[in-house]
């Protein structure tokens, strides 16, 4: 009988121990969920709050303390980055405005000189001057585009036909395509592709990608869009290599043949695409550059 009592007592002790461990595990599980939720909210909203847990467990409190310490460091680094990015944007905007007035005067004087009788050498020099002035004007406009894109304005999503927006962008480059002697290969789905996106941002993305493709194209240009909304722009680009293709979305990065470009076009396209929840990527295969763009489908 005594042995039976001892066995029952041992079973009861083990049962209570298991219950205690289950309660402990449940408390730890709840604390970890609290930490995960707070951490996600802090990163998503950029608030000054820190991780807070209801558990009094010393290990959980120590973990929360370490996370809060790293969050403080991350917050300071983010503020420094935002301040530097804001200063850069303001400097770019100021420089662009300062260049606009003398550039306007240069084009005015060039127009006046075009009306004068000049010799072959003078005409050649004037043509060179106009070409470099046009290049400077294009660079200035790209810098202005970057400063506008860096100024994070609220998006205005609306239900729009992604295929129709792509067609409009392609038509706007029709004259340039003809001028370069390119016969584009365009493959689009039969019906519309609906998405909830900011129309102005989508137009800017398409324009920047197409302009980049035409700038570096070796005589061809292809656009393929699927019914699921995936769009692939491609062109022959013998001056590129896989490493350069991977850096095309970096700010101010240009390949050797892009001396008249700031390298901001694809950087702006990437920033705008990601703001709207899309994805953009570049790959280089067999001397051909492929840029693929996708946006989330309607829920």
Image: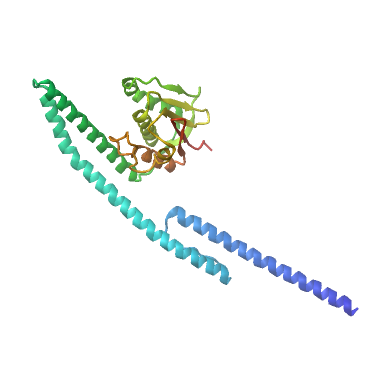
Q: Nearer the viewer, residue 243 or 142?
A: 243
What percent of the width, then of the height, locates residue 72? 42, 63
Tell me the quarter of the image containing the C terminus: top right
Q: Is residue 49 visible?
A: no
Residue sitting farthest toward the bottom: 2
**Residue positioned 38% across, 56% down in the render:** 78
Residue sitting farthest toward the left: 117
Colour scheme employed for the rendering of this structure = rainbow
Q: Is residue 66 visible?
A: yes
Examine the rendered structure and indicate whether residue 31 appears above or below residue 116: below
Q: Residue 82 vs residue 115: left or right?
A: right
Residue sitting farthest toward the right: 1
**Residue positioned 52% across, 65% down in the render:** 64
**Residue positioned 14% across, 23% down in the render:** 123
Q: Quadrant of residue 20?
A: bottom right
Tell me the quarter of the image containing the N terminus: bottom right
What percent of the width, then of the height, locates residue 217? 37, 27
What percent of the width, then of the height, locates residue 215? 34, 30
Q: Quadrant of residue 94?
A: top left
What percent of the width, then of the height, locates residue 99? 19, 40
Examine the rendered structure and indicate whether residue 153 appears above or below residue 69: above
Q: Nearer the viewer, residue 269 or 139?
A: 139
Q: Nearer the viewer, residue 201 or 280?
A: 280
For the image, the number of numbered tags is 0
């Amino acid at each position: 009988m005594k042995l039976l009592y001892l066995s029952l007592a041992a079973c009861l002790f083990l049962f209570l121990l298991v219950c205690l461990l289950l309660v402990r595990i449940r408390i730890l599980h709840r604390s970890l969920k609290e930490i995960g939720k707070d951490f996600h909210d802090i990163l998503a909203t950029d608030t000054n709050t820190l991780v807070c847990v209801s558990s009094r467990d010393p290990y959980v409190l120590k973990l929360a303390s370490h996370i809060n310490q790293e969050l403080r460091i991350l917050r300071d680094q983010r503020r420094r980055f935002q301040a530097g990015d804001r200063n850069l944007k303001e400097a770019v905007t100021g420089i662009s405005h300062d260049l606009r007035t003398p550039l306007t005067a240069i084009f005015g004087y060039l127009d006046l000189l075009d009306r004068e009788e000049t010799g072959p050498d003078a005409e050649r020099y004037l043509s060179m001057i106009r070409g470099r002035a046009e290049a400077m004007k294009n660079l200035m406009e790209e810098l202005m585009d970057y400063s506008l894109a860096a100024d994070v304005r609220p998006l205005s999503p609306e239900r729009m036909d992604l295929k129709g927006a792509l067609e409009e962008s392609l038509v706007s480059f029709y004259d340039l395509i003809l001028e370069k002697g390119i016969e584009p290969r365009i493959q689009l789905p039969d019906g519309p592709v609906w998405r909830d996106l900011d129309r102005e941002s989508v137009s800017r993305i398409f324009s920047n990608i197409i302009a980049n493709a035409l700038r570096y194209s070796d005589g061809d240009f292809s656009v393929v869009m699927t019914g699921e909304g995936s769009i692939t722009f491609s062109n022959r680009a013998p001056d590129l290599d896989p490493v350069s293709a991977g850096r095309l979305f970096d700010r101010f990065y240009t390949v050797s043949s892009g001396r008249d470009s700031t390298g901001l076009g694809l950087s702006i396209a990437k920033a705008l695409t990601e703001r709207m929840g899309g994805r953009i990527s570049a790959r280089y295969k067999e001397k051909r550059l492929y840029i693929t763009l996708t946006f989330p489908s309607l829920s």
